[in-house]
């Protein structure tokens, strides 16, 4: 893989200019979208339907929190997105454990759940933690008890496809335990397509009143240790919203994010004048730098061996995204058009 130089980066897309920022060098500037409407909805690459739905809620006069939650519910309910909600890939014991957080700009309040089992819309439970308790984060059994109290229906979230993928992983893991290796070396087609261990949806929105809201929801890293909590339900890591500045969220290896409080930092950088895309990229740089301290996480050129992506939207309606590696896309509805866009990135692949 080749490092993507700042110079290359400035060349990319033509519209990018240089900003002499407090961060000490030229960083890309993304143009302010002038679409004649203040509504915005931004999401991770798997969130095209979410931004579409969020925009329809905003246009109908809905609140941005309603908008983002309605958006991600589509993906939580979808068994074919195997990184979120129903159909999500399970932990090492074959049990689906979900994490989610919400944050609402106008009240600067947040709610989250972690390691929640049997409830397919953890984003809705996270919202209730924010709105109906004096707490911010509920985990495990307590989160499930709270969801039950609010009438959520319990169901088995493990689809056959997710179970087959898990079983394949389990049988491949060791030749010293009592599980025989897979019957065939070939990966069945239905399993092949889902063997990725990553995925999450983050969605951010801004309405005409300047209200910002965000949500992040996930089944976390597949095959994780039971009880492992990622960045998604941690305010400041997987999601952060400050109505005076902007909102940010993430997908990818949560452990790297948890140790750098990336979403908080992105919002903070936007508050210091960086554009959303530049702030995301700056945090990618910081994470790549810290990762060098942990050799097992680095490739032979000292670059992170994992993926991480960030999404940001500021209160003016500017938005952007950046990833550690090229090839990542994000969904953004700018009020006029919903489309998947290329994220900026730090390193080229190959
Ligand atoms: N960020 C999620 C987690 O670490 C996983 C992902 O987005 O791939 O739980």
Image (spheres, helix red, strand yellow):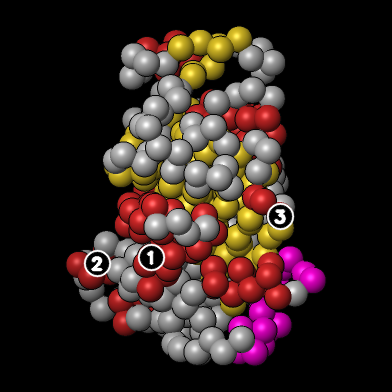
67 and 294: which is toward the camera = 67
**Sequence-wise, which precedes: disc 2 or disc 3?**
3
Q: Within 10 angstroms of label 2, few (less than 14), some, or many (20 or more) residues?
A: some
Q: Which residues are magenta?
A: 134-149
| Residue depicted at 58% across the width and 29% down the height | 279
What residue is shown with label 2? 187
Above or below, 311 relative to 224: above
Cβ(mark 3) to ligand 1 < 8 Å? no
**Sequence-wise, which precedes: disc 2 or disc 1?**
1
Q: CA distance from mark 2 to mark 1?
A: 26 Å
23 and 206: which is toward the camera = 206
Residue 43 spot, x, y in % from top left: 43, 49
Mark 2 in CB contact with mark 1 (< 8 angstroms): no
Query: Does dot 3 land on a helix, a strand or a loop?
Result: helix
What residue is shown with label 3? 107
Mark 3 in CB contact with mark 1 (< 8 angstroms): no
**Sequence-wise, which precedes: disc 3 or disc 1?**
1
| Residue depicted at 74% across the width and 66% down the height | 136
What residue is shown with label 1? 75
Residue 84 spot, x, y in % from top left: 44, 66
The mark lying in front, picked from 2 and 3, is 3
| Residue depicted at 52% across the width and 58% down the height | 63
- Quarter of the picture containing the C terminus is top left
The mark lying in front, picked from 3 and 1, is 3
> Would residue 56 be seen by someone viewing this image from the given angle?
yes
Query: Does dot 1 land on a helix, a strand or a loop?
Result: helix
Above or below, 113 relative to 270: below
Above or below, 177 relative to 256: below
* Magenta segment includes 245: no
What secondary structure characterizes most of the magenta part? helix
């Amino acid at each position: 893989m080749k490092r993507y130089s700042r110079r290359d980066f400035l060349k990319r897309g033509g519209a990018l200019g240089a900003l002499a920022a407090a961060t000490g060098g030229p960083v890309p500037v993304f143009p302010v979208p002038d679409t004649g409407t203040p509504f915005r909805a931004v999401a991770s690459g798997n969130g095209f339907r979410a931004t579409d739905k969020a925009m329809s809620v905003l246009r109908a006069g809905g609140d941005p929190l309603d908008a983002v939650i309605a958006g991600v519910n589509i993906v939580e309910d979808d068994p074919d997105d195997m990184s979120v909600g129903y159909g999500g890939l399970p932990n090492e014991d074959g049990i689906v454990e979900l994490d989610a957080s919400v944050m609402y700009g106008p009240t600067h309040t947040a709610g989250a759940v972690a390691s929640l089992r049997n409830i397919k819309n953890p984003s809705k439970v996270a919202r209730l933690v924010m709105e109906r308790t004096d707490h911010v984060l509920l985990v495990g059994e307590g989160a499930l008890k709270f969801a039950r109290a609010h009438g959520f229906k319990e169901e088995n979230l493990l689809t056959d496809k997710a179970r087959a993928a898990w079983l394949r992983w389990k049988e491949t893991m060791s030749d010293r335990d009592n599980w025989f290796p897979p019957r065939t070396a070939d990966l069945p087609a239905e399993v092949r397509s889902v063997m990725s261990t990553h995925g999450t949806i983050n969605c951010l929105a801004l309405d005409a009143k300047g209200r910002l809201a965000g949500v992040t929801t996930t089944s976390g890293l597949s095959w994780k240790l039971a009880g492992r909590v990622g960045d998604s339900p941690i305010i400041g890591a997987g999601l952060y919203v400050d109505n005076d500045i902007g909102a940010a969220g993430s997908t990818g290896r949560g452990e790297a994010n948890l140790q750098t409080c990336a979403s908080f930092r992105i919002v903070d950088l936007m508050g210091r004048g960086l554009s959303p895309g530049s702030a995301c990229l700056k945090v990618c740089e910081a994470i790549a730098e810290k990762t060098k301290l942990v050799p097992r996480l680095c490739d032979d050129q000292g670059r992170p061996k994992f993926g991480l992506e960030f999404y940001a939207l500021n209160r003016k309606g500017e938005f952007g995204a950046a990833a550690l590696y090229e090839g990542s896309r994000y969904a953004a509805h700018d009020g006029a058009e919903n489309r998947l866009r290329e994220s900026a990135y730090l390193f080229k692949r190959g």
